[in-house]
Image (cartoon, grey):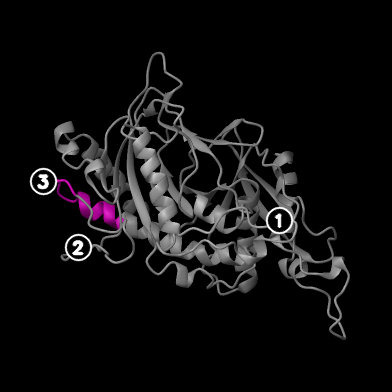
């Protein structure tokens, strides 16, 4: 646990004269939650130069400190932090700032975190889980009628080994069903005009309640994602509305995933999902109680993301990593289901508007840390990654 505390406090204000003390829960590889008090520097103290009586440029030590120049760990984490979102809608600016600080530290040092008090009712989650279990029990012929390879916008069913997130492997040992934005209600309108990946979902026939349950959870996750963006903005020293005009029609794809039991001798080149990073800004993941998700640290060690009841897993994706010039980490992860029982999970991949250009955020670049990536449209980037993923499975 001490390594994690060092990582989360590393590179901050050298003096305890300005800041706040906060309590952070951390889940260890043993599956137990630990609580620790951390001293976090006041962000305003870090970002604001000393007041001057004239317009002269002060010494280097008095200039604004950028996130790009803050010393960071090498991500040799052994644990994944748990963050309580109860203050996400607080009217107390200090409480929201403290929450944004915790999120920032997790995104800089790990790229993964658990979130609790996320606001999604358990009955909504369980409705989607029940719908997923019902769908994956359908005959293969029925599911293949919705084959994702027939869709121009990556919606529908993926069979076992139908995608390959790691080209070094033989394929991913899971089934999936992908949906995008669609209103819940009689019209069930999809959303057009927001990039080439928009368009209608495909749905199974004669499966009562499936569509409504899936879309209800989908929109609950989208609303949670909209709640998170202001906190990310604050964590990046931007106004809390920084992402508002960039997420008016966010590209959010949700996947229902089923992992069959892998028993006997397991081929290391065939796992639930091979090692990869996610493509969008961030992922909101529900996972059942079967341990499978693993996160890679800088030492090449796979850290178990132990399922914790009442939490969701949140991880940074490539869009936000590019946007932040890798200040926020998009960390490699995989799913290895060797439990001998079936597993279910439901990730929602939350991206920006399709046409948003991913220019580096100002606080994340400096003279010593110039932009690392060419500027691309967010949607073009995701589409190219998806095309490569499904091409590898052929």
Residue receiving disc 1: 369
Sequence-wise, which precedes: disc 2 or disc 1?
Answer: 2
**Mark 1 burial class by Cα count in 10 Å: few <14, some 14-19, many 20+:** few
Q: CA distance from mark 1 to mark 3?
A: 55 Å
Residue mark closest to the camera, 1 vs 3: 1
The answer to whether residue 379 shows anywhere in this view is yes
User: For this rendering, which residue is in front, 387 or 321?
Assistant: 387
Q: Which residues are magenta?
A: 203-216
Q: Which mark is residue 188?
A: 2
> Residue 80 at x, y = what percent?
59, 43
**Mark 3 burial class by Cα count in 10 Å: few <14, some 14-19, many 20+:** few
Is 109 on the left or on the right of 133, as rendered? right
> Residue 210 at x, y = what percent?
21, 49
Say how many tags the image has.
Answer: 3
Q: Is residue 11 magenta?
A: no
Residue receiving disc 3: 206
Q: Quadrant of the C terminus?
A: top left
Q: Is residue 206 magenta?
A: yes
Q: Is residue 240 above or below residue 315?
A: below
Q: Residue at x 18, y 51 (%)?
A: 209
Is 125 on the left or on the right of 9, as rendered? left
Q: CA distance from mark 2 to mark 1?
A: 47 Å
């Amino acid at each position: 646990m001490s390594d994690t505390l060092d990582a989360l406090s590393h590179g901050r204000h050298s003096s305890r004269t300005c800041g706040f003390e906060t309590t952070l829960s951390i889940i260890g590889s043993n599956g137990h939650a630990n609580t620790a008090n951390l001293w976090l520097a006041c962000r305003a103290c870090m970002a604001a130069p000393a007041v001057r009586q004239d317009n002269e440029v002060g010494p280097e030590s008095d200039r604004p400190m950028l996130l790009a120049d803050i010393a960071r760990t090498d991500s040799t984490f052994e644990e994944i932090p748990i963050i309580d979102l109860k203050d996400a809608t607080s009217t107390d600016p200090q409480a929201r700032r403290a929450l944004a600080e915790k999120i920032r530290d997790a995104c800089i040092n790990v790229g993964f975190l658990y979130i609790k008090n996320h606001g999604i009712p358990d009955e909504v989650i369980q409705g989607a889980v029940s719908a997923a279990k019902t769908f994956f029990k359908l005959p293969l012929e029925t599911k293949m009628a919705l084959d994702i390879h027939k869709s121009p916008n990556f919606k529908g069913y993926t069979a076992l080994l139908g995608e390959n997130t790691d080209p070094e492997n033989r394929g991913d040992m899971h089934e999936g069903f992908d949906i995008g934005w669609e209103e819940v209600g009689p019209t069930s309108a999809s959303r057009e005009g927001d990039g080439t990946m928009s368009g209608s979902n495909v749905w199974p026939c004669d499966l009562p309640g499936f569509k409504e349950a899936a879309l209800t959870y989908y929109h609950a996750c989208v609303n949670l994602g909209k709640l998170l963006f202001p906190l990310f903005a604050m964590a990046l020293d931007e106004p809390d509305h920084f992402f508002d005009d960039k997420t008016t029609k966010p590209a959010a794809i949700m996947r229902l995933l089923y992992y069959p039991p892998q028993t006997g001798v397991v081929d290391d080149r065939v796992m639930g999902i091979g090692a990869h990073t996610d493509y969008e800004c961030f992922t909101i993941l529900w996972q059942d109680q079967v341990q499978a998700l693993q996160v890679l640290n800088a030492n090449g060690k796979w850290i178990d993301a132990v399922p914790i009841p009442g939490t969701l897993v949140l991880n940074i994706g490539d869009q936000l990593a590019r946007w932040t010039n890798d200040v926020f980490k998009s960390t490699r992860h995989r799913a290895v289901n060797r439990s001998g029982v079936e597993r279910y999970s439901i990730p929602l991949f939350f991206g920006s508007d399709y046409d948003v250009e991913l220019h580096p955020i100002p606080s994340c670049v400096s003279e010593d840390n110039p932009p690392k990536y060419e500027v691309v449209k967010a949607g073009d980037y995701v589409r190219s990654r998806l095309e490569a993923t499904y091409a590898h499975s052929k």
